[in-house]
Amino acid sequence: MKKILTLMIAALALSIPAAAKTYRIKKVGDFPEFLALSPDGRTAYVTSFGTGELIAVDLGRRVVTRRVVVGSAPLGLAVTADGKSAYVACRDSGTVAVVELGSFRVEANIVVGGAPNAVALGAKGYRAYVTNFGRTREGVLHIVDTRDRSVLASVKMGLSPIALAVSPVDEMVYVANGGSNELWVVAPERQTVVAKVAVGEAPDGVAMTPDGSRVFVTNSRSNDLTVVDTKSRSALVSVPVGKSPFGVDVSPDGKRVFVVNTGAKTVSILPVDLSLLTAKTVQIDKGCIDIKVMPNNRTLVIVSEQSHSLLIAEVP
């Protein structure tokens, strides 16, 4: 009985949102949406939807340092492993802007058409993958050659392909399909969908462990996080988190997964090994969307669309 009571108290403690030590960087564009970190974790790159800009933020000094217009309605982005370039999906321009981060200028605009919304880079460095809502009911995944900045192929993705992640092991691409409530697995060399995994309702965010063994999918309508095993290509479990989960990221050490609950103003924290299925919860700000974990594995960088700011949160 004593052991059961101890477990109940522990579960209750985990369910109560704790306050994280938080710093706010104000005036980060107009309706900032998504972010990426430089390889050393010192700089955050944020897309400003309202102003059509990519914005650089010095996380140590906590100030905006540079900005450049990239296109109309920029959304998802990715930074190359060497930290030299960023690829930005510009929804209303139908382009992917390539920004040289040293000079902070647009080097190229890759025309994909439709409504591109998210970008991920392959571990080998010569492929970029772009999800595109399309202008009709049929979305696509573009496979882009980063060397000559051309579209190699476009794979049909059904209704509402949204977020994506690329395996660092075999470069398989995992795409959240909002129309079918599935995670689609694409073999880029074959340019075909090889598996479809049922997840929760309205999947919005995707993150992968550094070893490529698991994919985490946030489901904004069913308020849970689906864990997918990449070897068996099957869902292991769906864990309840907060209201309207959206952004998700795995710590660089591969031990914890962090979920932004946009509707609850919280971040849920779970162990990647699923040794605990009750999320620890940290209170943050309203209107938060995207999240990244810094190299120290405990400092979170979070975009707040509603307050036009960037949050830096320290968690245990």
Image (cartoon, rainbow, N blue to C red):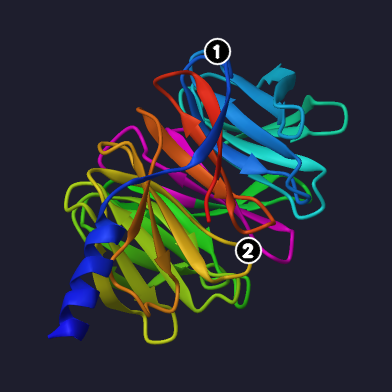
Label 2 sits on residue = 252
Q: Secondary structure at mark 1?
A: loop
Relative to 150, does residue 53 appear above or below in the rendering? above
Q: What mark, if any, has residue 13 been given in the picture?
A: none
Q: Is residue 262 left or right of residue 108?
A: left
Q: Is residue 79 left or right of residue 237?
A: right
Q: What mark, if any, has residue 51 been given in the picture?
A: 1
Q: Does the rendering let one see residue 53? A: yes
Residue drawn where x is 32% and y is 37% of the image: 262
In primary-sequence order, the first of circles 1 and 2 is: 1
Location of the N terminus by quadrant is bottom left
Please state the horizontal and vertical placement of residue 43, each as a whole percent of the image.
Answer: 73, 37
Q: Secondary structure at mark 2?
A: loop
Relative to 95, does residue 38 appear above or below in the rendering? below
Q: Are the residues at dot 1 and dot 2 in contact (C-beta closer than 8 Å)? A: no
Residue 280 drawn in magenta: no
* Residue ranking furthest to the front: 2
Magenta-highlighted residues? 113-141
Amino acid under disc 1? Thr
Residue drawn where x is 56% and y is 47% of the image: 292
Q: In which quarter of the view is residue 9 placed?
A: bottom left
Tell which of 297 and 116 is nearer to you: 297
Please state the horizontal and vertical placement of residue 270, each as a whole percent of the image.
Answer: 39, 65
Q: Does the rendering let one see residue 198? A: no
Residue 128 drawn in magenta: yes
Residue drawn where x is 43% and y is 79% of the image: 273
User: Mark 1, residues whose alpha carbon is within 10 Å: few (<14), some, or many (≥20)?
Assistant: some
Amino acid under disc 2? Pro
Relative to 189, does residue 108 appear above or below in the rendering? above
Tell which of 98 and 39 is nearer to you: 39
CA separation in Å, label 1 and label 2: 31 Å
Residue drawn where x is 22% and y is 61% of the image: 12
